[in-house]
Image (spheres, rainbow, N blue to C red):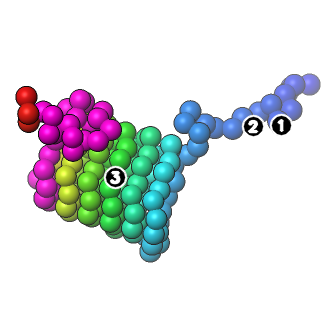
């Protein structure tokens, strides 16, 4: 009488539009191998391998990545030993330690962050499938 909807009508699945929620690799977890995802990815454990996401990659304060990171956005607070490619915004926060080259559309670095490597910025740099050749072509002009 008061409610004409049944339970199945009221329970709609929540979707963020990219096929699923965020993936978490928690502290104390060690993962060996490459990761590919279309959704957000948060790493608080250790990943030994390359990471590729069509969305945002977050490396928490206890997170360690031994490999390259490629994503739409990246937010680094932990340790990364490898190259980072962020199509849009790359944030180096807190006491992060990055050893490798970075390629970003936009870059934000906090004063307490440590970065050792080369920095390449701009949408045309990140869009190239092989960013090393983009630097060579740009230097030749």
Magenta stretch in the rendered image: 110-138
The answer to whether residue 122 is magenta is yes
**Does the image show residue 106?**
no
**Mark 2, mark 3: which one is toward the viewer?**
3
What x and y, as percent, mark residue 8? 82, 36
Q: Secondary structure at mark 3?
A: strand
> Where is mark 2, residue-wise?
11
In space, the residues marked 2 and 1 are separated at their CA atoms by: 6 Å
- Disc 2 vs disc 1: Cβ atoms closer than 8 Å? yes
Q: Residue at x 13, y 58 (%)?
A: 116
Q: Residue at x 15, y 34 (%)?
A: 137
The answer to whether residue 84 is magenta is no
What x and y, as percent, mark residue 82? 26, 59
> Where is mark 1, residue-wise?
7
**Does the image show residue 59?**
yes
Characterize the local packing of mark 1: few (<14), some (14-19) or many (20 or more) Cα atoms within 10 angstroms. few
Q: Is residue 27 above or below residue 19?
A: below
In space, the residues marked 3 and 1 are separated at their CA atoms by: 43 Å
Task: Residue at the far right: name it.
Answer: 1
**Mark 3, mark 1: which one is toward the viewer?**
3
What x and y, as percent, mark residue 134? 20, 37
Give residue 132's quadrant in the image: top left
């Amino acid at each position: 009488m008061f409610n004409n909807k049944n339970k199945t009508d009221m329970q709609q699945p929540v979707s963020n539009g990219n096929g699923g929620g965020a993936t978490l690799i928690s502290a104390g977890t060690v993962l060996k191998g490459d990761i590919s995802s279309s959704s957000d990815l948060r790493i608080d454990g250790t990943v030994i391998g390359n990471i590729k996401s069509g969305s945002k990659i977050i490396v928490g304060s206890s997170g360690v990545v031994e490999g390259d990171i490629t994503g739409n956005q990246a937010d680094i607070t932990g340790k990364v030993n490898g190259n980072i490619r962020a199509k849009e915004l790359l944030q180096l926060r807190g006491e992060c330690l990055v050893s490798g080259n970075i390629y970003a559309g936009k870059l934000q670095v906090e004063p307490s962050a440590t970065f050792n490597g080369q920095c390449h910025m701009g949408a045309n740099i990140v869009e190239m499938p092989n960013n090393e050749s983009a630097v060579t072509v740009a230097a030749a002009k």
